[in-house]
Image: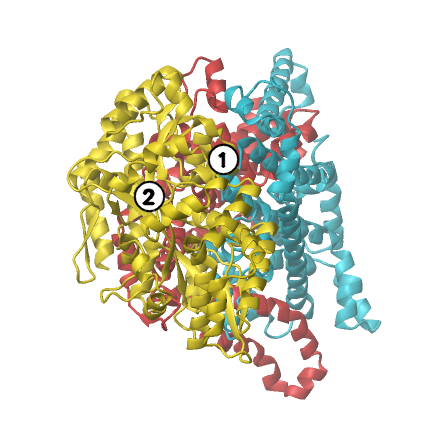
């Protein structure tokens, strides 16, 4: 929950910074076309309230947004964009959602889109997406998260990531391991962790365990071992399958590292932010997290870029996959047609064009690079792989991340099957799984079977509500 | 909705009814009401109305979108069926018990010693009170650093000086709760010490003089004069501490978030989770149902406390 | 929340004490006179005669040593460590927590904390919250107590018991309904939501029955002759309140002020809920939120800065603090 939220924030600020770019290239062909056949009449101005940043974002982000807003309004005279502070967290989001005081355009994580969709809290934008012409370009796995049973589309996926295994190259070297040849199976991960702990006294391997991130990572590694924590029955109901061999193997793996090898270190209360902090400080050999955390590692915690390494999660068992996530831009269900048209225009202009359009992408990368932000951190394409790879060529000159050190990930990620996060009561069930991860890490006599049986019952009770 | 305004108007009616509105105004009734108004307003809106609402909400399903629906005792049943409830209650009792064992005798002992020294009471009091001045959030976050479980952690280094192996502190289900209690005791002891000290210093000197005339030794004086004089304060502090520990939230919330393995989930943390953890909408019904149950329990305790305080202060 | 026990305890003890204080000015003066020498020059269990025994003298020296060591270690130690760590680089703090600047002092931590974490702004917010809470609590407590004690309308009794009744309701029961009241104020509706508005913190704090009872008991004990004389001189309710009652009540107003400011400074859960916008949050809410995105050395510097003002205030107003904290026993005597 935290992880997604922070990532969204970071990306939002980055986007805003990238906005400056679009002011620079004044003739945006796409926007002009829109203006030509625009549905809004020039004299009837539509007010559009759009989500900007979580409260407290820095001034530079707002300046960039203001510039972008002015640019958009110049291109679309009938639309008055009003930036609204916005944060996807409870309980504020719950209150705004219930009270209908959310902006007309806002973003939500994939994990919540299904619930919102089922509650009728998202606007159907199928026709608009088709009209814009990139409905077919979306990565089908990602599009699935914003479609209902009839295939109607309820939002624009705008950014995504896949889970990766992050490792510290200098700790690998200290332990006599080859940093260019990272572990490819979970057994190799365990051996490497042991070697690192042995040689350096640091945690060879660590894992998030609190604020729902424990459940999140447990789910990711379950999927990597061919398990699933939940199955959709196709009629809107779900069956919990937490008690599966993949989850059990993951827990046994953690327990073995902690109690048999003593290679886990001594922190069992890390979350998305703190594990990054520990890793950046050189205290952790390996951990799993989204493929895009490099940005936070260098920006927030001053990690030495030479130490960073990224590879794919080892896949094992039958039908394994790599868990991915991300967020989508959506339109409030209560807006009128004119506002809806304006909202779609804004989403296309603000979120989507830099994924599609060379000028927009280049300008975005330029601004980020100039402000020493990471450019080129591996993500999962929300559109097609071809378009994504093409966009990497566009921004080639601005890429400032150690691409070679990420090659083990970027070379192999395309062979892995992306799998979406479980859709039923996602966050509640993650919360339910946190204590189990903590249990195997802190209790030598933890009864994994009993823990799984109980969690499965409790999860099913949640799903049946 | 209907209860509170009705109550408020009932308060104001009796005065004008007998004498007629005009005499009431001329007699200063309006001015009086102006003075009463701030109190009536804040208590109506922020105390009486939420109390009533809490009872109502505990038998309703409230989701902020649809009008609340009456669900009878469903919320209470759901809370009682939550497997975490038992854990939370036991953890809270465990915290309360540990806090009593640690946090109760130490301040009394310190206060007695401080009351006996002839010089330096001022500086000792200031030192003892210093932790109370540190904002509680800062204290918890600082102690979280102290509890670093690495061998180089602050406390583990100190243990190393006396040859004790590094401890896992917050990272172990067994040690997490005692760790919270140690910090909570550190943070609160100063306040208790000052209260006990003040009580000790107000023991009339004549009582000791009289005891000495009878040839009482130091220990006899302590037992027959000091302890009885302190009894009232001790009792009040005991009940207050129980009331406070039953609502423990800050420490588990900031130190451990309830972990590891639910070892520090407390009742209030559970209420918070029901109501506020889910960004798609909280279960306000379950949260208020549990609040009401806790409140009834605590109200009984405080009622007992008030009766006893009354007896103490009039005796 | 146990940290609140002392504040609450002294409030309750003060309440009990004022309840039992005899109702004359002479008694009030005696109480005050006795309070002054509270910390020094009083005798305890050990008498002068006892002190003449060698064994007792040595024991007393032992007590001094014990008290000095324990209190310096426990009271001052953590704060000194924080002060040291605030200007020490992260790695030094992690590897040698007790070494004194093995690799030099890092003053930049403080400015980074001040500028990048915006401690200045949250500090200001904290002060605004405390000041507003103080003002509203005093306003409600004094006017309310004045109504109940001095003006005494017919409905005073009912009103007084309704206020008193809230003392029996633990604050936890209010958490959720009060939150929803802030989100959706009665009669006004959601458009007047008080989220991110300081009134959402100030007003609920003002609905404090302890304060009202504390002040009311004090007013009850004010000399009636003075009040009657003022009335005879033609003083209306406002002048009586402002020029006679309030000036005579400075001691109790000081106590209520200390309680109000300390409570506001310490509050965490409530501002966390009703002030979701970081721009208006106080330090207590902000510090935990920034922890995971902040380097340890800078974070410790932020903690140190957040501690300086309360400690400075305590050192300056030590007597007021300690007197309020110990009020129970002192007034009781």
In which quarter of the view is residue C45 placed?
top right
Relative placement, left or right, of B94 versus C249 is left
Q: Colour of chain A?
A: yellow
Relative placement, left or right, of A91 versus A183 is right
Q: Tell me the residue at 33%/35% (across/down).
A: A409
Quick one: SS at disc 1? Answer: helix
Q: Colour of chain C?
A: cyan
Q: Position of residue A433 (x, y in %)?
A: 28, 43
- Report in which chain the residue with disc 1 lies: A
The foreground one among B101 and A273 is: A273
Q: Is residue A188 above or below residue C260?
A: above
Q: Is residue B158 above or below residue A106?
A: above
Asked if one can make out residue B140 in the rendered structure from this viewpoint, the answer is: no
- Report in which chain the residue with disc 2 lies: A
| Residue with the mark numbered 2 | A162
Q: Count the marks.
A: 2
Quick one: SS at disc 2? Answer: strand
| Residue with the mark numbered 1 | A298
- Mark 2 or mark 1: whose residue is earlier in sequence: 2
Q: How is the image coloured?
A: by chain
Looking at the figure, which quarter contains the N terminus of chain B?
Answer: bottom left
The residue most toward the right is: C233
Q: Tell me the residue at 33%/67% (across/down).
A: A130
Marks 2/1 in contact by CB < 8 Å: the verdict is no
Which dot marks residue A462? none
Q: Position of residue A47 (x, y in %)?
A: 52, 72
The foreground one among B201 and A283 is: A283
The foreground one among C197 and A274 is: A274
**Chain rendered red:** B
Dot 1, how many residues are within 10 Å of its Cα: few (below 14), some (14-19), or many (20+)? many
């Amino acid at each position: 929950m935290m992880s997604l939220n922070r990532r969204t924030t970071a990306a939002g600020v980055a986007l805003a910074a990238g906005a400056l770019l679009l002011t620079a290239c004044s003739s945006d062909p796409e926007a002009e076309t829109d203006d030509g056949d625009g549905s809004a009449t020039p004299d009837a101005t539509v007010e559009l309230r759009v989500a900007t940043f979580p409260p407290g974002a820095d001034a530079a982000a707002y300046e960039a947004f203001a510039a972008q807003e002015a640019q958009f309004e110049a291109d679309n005279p009938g639309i008055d964009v009003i930036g609204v502070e916005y944060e996807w967290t409870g309980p504020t989001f719950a209150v705004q959602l219930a009270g209908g005081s959310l902006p007309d355009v806002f973003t939500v994580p994939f994990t919540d889109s299904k619930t919102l969709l089922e509650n009728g809290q998202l606007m159907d934008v199928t026709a608009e997406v088709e009209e814009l012409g990139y409905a077919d370009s979306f990565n089908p796995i990602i599009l699935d998260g914003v479609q209902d049973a009839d295939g109607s589309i309820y939002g624009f996926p705008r950014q995504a990531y896949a889970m990766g295994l992050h490792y510290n190259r200098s700790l690998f070297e200290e332990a006599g391991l080859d940093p260019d040849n990272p572990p490819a199976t979970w057994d190799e991960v365990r051996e490497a962790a042991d070697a690192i702990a042995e040689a350096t006294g640091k945690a060879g391997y660590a894992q998030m365990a609190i604020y729902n991130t424990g459940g999140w990572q447990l789910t990711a590694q379950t999927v990597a071992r061919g398990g699933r924590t939940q199955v959709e029955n196709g009629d809107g109901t779900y069956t919990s399958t937490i008690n599966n061999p993949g989850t059990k193997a993951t827990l046994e793996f953690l327990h073995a590292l902690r109690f048999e090898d003593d290679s886990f270190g001594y922190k069992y209360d890390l979350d998305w932010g703190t594990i990054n902090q520990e890793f950046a400080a050189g205290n952790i050999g390996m951990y799993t997290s989204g493929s895009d955390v490099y940005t936070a590692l260098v920006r927030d915690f001053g990690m030495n870029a030479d130490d960073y390494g990224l590879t794919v999660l080892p896949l094992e068992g039958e039908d394994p996959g790599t868990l991915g996530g991300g967020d989508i831009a959506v339109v409030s269900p209560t807006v009128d047609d004119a506002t809806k048209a304006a909202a779609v225009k804004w989403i296309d202009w603000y979120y989507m064009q830099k994924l599609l359009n060379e000028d927009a992408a280049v300008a975005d990368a330029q601004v980020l690079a100039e402000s020493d932000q990471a450019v080129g951190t591996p993500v999962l394409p929300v559109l097609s792989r071809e378009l994504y790879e093409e966009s990497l060529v566009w921004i080639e000159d601005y890429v400032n991340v150690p691409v070679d050190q990420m090659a083990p990930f970027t070379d192999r990620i395309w062979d892995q099957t992306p799998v979406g996060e479980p859709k039923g009561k996602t966050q509640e069930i993650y919360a339910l799984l946190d204590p189990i991860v903590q249990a195997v890490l802190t209790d030598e006599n933890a009864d994994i079977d009993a823990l799984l049986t109980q969690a499965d019952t409790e999860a099913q009770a949640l799903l049946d509500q | 909705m209907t209860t509170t305004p009705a109550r408020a108007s009932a308060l104001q009616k009796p005065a004008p009814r007998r004498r007629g509105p005009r005499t009431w105004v001329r007699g200063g009734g309006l001015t009086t009401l102006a003075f009463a108004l701030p109190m009536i307003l804040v208590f109506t809106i922020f105390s009486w109305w939420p109390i009533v609402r809490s009872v109502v909400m505990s038998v309703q399903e409230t989701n902020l979108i649809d009008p609340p629906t009456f669900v009878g005792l469903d919320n209470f049943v759901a809370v009682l069926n939550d497997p975490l409830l038992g854990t939370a209650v036991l953890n809270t009792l465990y915290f309360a018990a540990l806090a009593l064992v640690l946090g109760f005798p130490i301040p009394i002992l310190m206060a007695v010693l401080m009351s006996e020294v002839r010089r330096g009471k001022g500086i000792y009091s200031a030192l003892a009170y210093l932790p109370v001045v540190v904002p509680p959030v800062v204290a918890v976050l600082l102690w979280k650093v102290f509890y670093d479980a690495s061998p180089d952690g602050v406390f583990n280094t100190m243990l190393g000086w006396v040859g004790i192996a590094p401890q896992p502190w917050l990272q172990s289900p067994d040690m997490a709760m005692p760790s919270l209690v140690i910090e909570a005791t550190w943070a609160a002891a100063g306040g208790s010490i000052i209260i006990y000290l003040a009580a000790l210093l107000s023991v009339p000197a004549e009582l000791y003089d009289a005891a000495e005339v009878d040839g009482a030794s130091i220990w006899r004086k302590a037992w027959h004069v000091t302890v009885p004089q302190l009894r009232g304060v001790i009792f009040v502090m005991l009940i207050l501490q129980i009331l406070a520990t039953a609502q423990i939230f800050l420490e588990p919330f900031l130190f451990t978030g309830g972990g590891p393995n639910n070892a520090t989930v407390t009742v209030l943390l559970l209420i918070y989770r029901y109501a506020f953890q889910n960004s798609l909408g909280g279960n306000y019904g379950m949260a208020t149902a549990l609040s009401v149950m806790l409140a009834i329990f605590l109200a009984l305790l405080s009622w007992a406390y008030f009766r006893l305080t009354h007896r103490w202060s009039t005796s | 929340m146990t940290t609140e026990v002392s504040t609450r305890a002294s409030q309750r003890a003060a309440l009990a004490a004022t309840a039992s204080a005899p109702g004359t000015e002479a008694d009030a003066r005696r109480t005050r006179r006795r309070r002054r020498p509270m910390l020094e020059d009083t005798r305890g269990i050990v008498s002068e005669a006892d002190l003449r025994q060698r064994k007792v003298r040595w024991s007393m020296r032992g007590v001094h040593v014990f008290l000095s060591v324990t209190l310096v270690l426990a009271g001052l130690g953590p704060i000194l460590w924080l002060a040291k760590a605030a200007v020490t680089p992260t790695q030094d703090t992690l590897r040698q927590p007790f070494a004194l600047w093995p690799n030099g002092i890092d003053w930049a931590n403080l400015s980074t904390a001040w500028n990048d974490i915006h401690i200045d702004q949250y500090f200001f917010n904290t002060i605004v919250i405390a000041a507003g809470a103080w003002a509203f609590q005093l306003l409600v407590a004094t006017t309310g107590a004045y109504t109940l004690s001095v003006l005494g309308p017919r409905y005073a009794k009912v009103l007084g018991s309704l206020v008193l009744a809230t003392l029996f309701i633990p604050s936890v029961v209010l958490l959720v309904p009060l939150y929803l009241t802030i989100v959706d104020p009665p009669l006004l509706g959601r458009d007047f939501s008080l989220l991110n508005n300081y009134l959402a913190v100030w007003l609920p704090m003002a609905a404090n029955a302890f304060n009202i009872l504390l002040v009311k008991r004090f007013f009850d004990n004010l000399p009636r002759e003075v009040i009657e004389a003022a009335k005879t001189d033609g003083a209306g309710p406002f002048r009586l309140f402002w020029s006679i009652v309030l000036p005579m009540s400075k001691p109790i107003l000081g106590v209520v002020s200390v309680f109000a400011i300390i409570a506001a400074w310490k509050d965490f859960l409530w501002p966390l809920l009703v002030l979701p916008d970081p721009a208006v949050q106080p330090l207590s809410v902000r510090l935990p939120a920034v922890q995971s995105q902040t380097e340890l050395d800078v974070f410790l510097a932020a903690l140190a800065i957040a501690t300086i003002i309360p400690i400075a205030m305590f050192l300056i107003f030590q007597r007021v603090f300690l007197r309020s904290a110990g009020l129970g026993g002192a007034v009781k005597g």
